[in-house]
Image (spheres, rainbow, N blue to C red):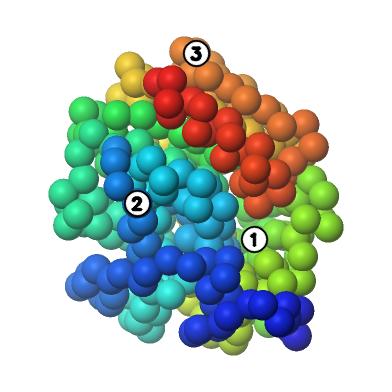
Amino acid sequence: MARAVDPSDSYRDGVNRRSYPFVDRWFDLPDGRMHYVDEGHGDPVVFVHGTPTWSFEWRHLIRVLHRTYRCIAPDHLGFGLSDRPPGAPYTPEAHATNFAAFVEHLGLDRFTLVVHDFGGPIALPVCLASPGRVRRLVLLNTWMWSLAGDRDMARKARIAGSRLGRFLYRRLNFSLRVLMPSAFGDRRKLSPRVHGQYLDRFPDPASRERVLWPLARSLLASGPWFDSLWARRDQLAGRPTLVLWGLADSAFRPAQLARWTEALPEAHVIAYPRAGHWPHEEIPAVVARDLHHWLAAS
C-alpha cells in the first residue's frame, strides 16, 4: 500500500516519528525482544493493545498524559517493533505470560492498567493473580470470557479460525484490510497515513499467518482458558474502574458492554455512540480528556 506522505513527517523503521515521537526501549524475553515505550513521570499507566495493532494506537493518549503520568506501552511479541521469532507461540496464553514477565521486569506496582481488545485477556491475568498490584482499571472494547455462548461472536470466530480464515489472513491480510476498517464507526477516521502504520507491520503472508491468525483461532480454541479467567472476575472488583466504549463497534456489541457493567456495577461508564472499536483512534481528544479527568479524580 502506498503511504500518504506529509512533507513534515519523519520516518524511521517505517514508523511516522512525528506521530509516534517516543524513545524505543527493549525487554529481552526468552523468545525475543519486546519493544515498549516509557514516557513521562508520575503514577504509572500501562497501555495494552490487542490485534492487529501495536502501541501506535495509544500515541494520542500518551502525548496528553505523559505530562503528569508515566505512560508505558509494550508491543506484544510479533507486533509493532517487537521481534517476530518463527518458533514462538503467539497465543493469548503466551502473550499473557510475556506481559506478566514485562511487569515484573519493570517492577511495576500500584499502576493503572488500560486494556483494549485482546489486551484484556492478555493483561488482566496480572490483575487476577495479584489484585493489589493494579490500582485502577480502564477497559476499552475488550472482553475476558469464552465466546462459545455468544451466537454472533462464535459464528464470526468459527470463520476466522477455520482453514478459510487462515487463507484470508495469510493471503488477503483480512484482519487489517477488512476487519479493522469495518470496526470503525466512521471509516474516514482511518486515514491512509494512519492505516499504513498498521499495515506496514505485517507486509508478508508469513507474518500474518504466524502472528495474527493464531489469535483469531484462539477466539474459540482458547475458550476454556477464557472461562478460567472469567471465573475469577471478582478479583477485578474493589478498585476504581473506567469503561470507555465505542458503541458503533461491529465486533464488540453493546451486549459485551452489558456483561462488564453487570460484573463491575461500580464502574464508571462512558459510551461513545458514533465511535467504533478504536474510540481512541476515532475521537482521541475526547477519550484523552475523559481519561485524564477520571484519573485525576480517582
**Position of residue 223 measured from the top left corner of the image (x, y, whole percent):** 46, 45
Say which of marks 1 and 2 sits in front: 2
Can residue 50 be seen? no
Could you say whether the residue bearing mark 3 is in a helix, strand or loop? loop
Could you say whether the residue bearing mark 2 is in a helix, strand or loop? loop
Distance of label 1 from label 3 (alpha carbons): 32 Å
- Identified at 47% across, 13% down, the residue is 266
Instruction: Give 280 or 237, whichever is nearer the viewer.
Output: 280
**Placement of 267 over or under 43, stated as above or below:** above
- Identified at 40% across, 79% down, the residue is 84
**Position of residue 254 measured from the top left corner of the image (x, y, whole percent):** 69, 29
Distance of label 1 from label 2 (alpha carbons): 39 Å
- What is the three-letter code of the residue carrying label 3? Pro
**Position of residue 34 measured from the top left corner of the image (x, y, whole percent):** 32, 69
Contact, CB < 8 Å: mark 1 with mark 3?
no
- What is the three-letter code of the residue carrying label 1? Ala
- Identified at 51% across, 27% down, the residue is 293
Circle 1 sits on which residue?
A: 160
Of the image marks 1 and 2, the number of the one nearer the N terminus:
2
- Few, some or many C-alpha atoms within 10 Å of disc 1 (few <14, some 14-19, many ≥20)? many
Circle 2 sits on which residue?
A: 40
**Placement of 198 over or under 85, stated as above or below:** above
Distance of label 2 from label 3 (alpha carbons): 32 Å
Circle 3 sits on which residue?
A: 265
**Placement of 265 over or under 180, stated as above or below:** above
Give the quadrant of the C terminus. top left
- Few, some or many C-alpha atoms within 10 Å of disc 3 (few <14, some 14-19, many ≥20)? few
- What is the three-letter code of the residue carrying label 2? Gly
Give the quadrant of the N terminus. bottom right
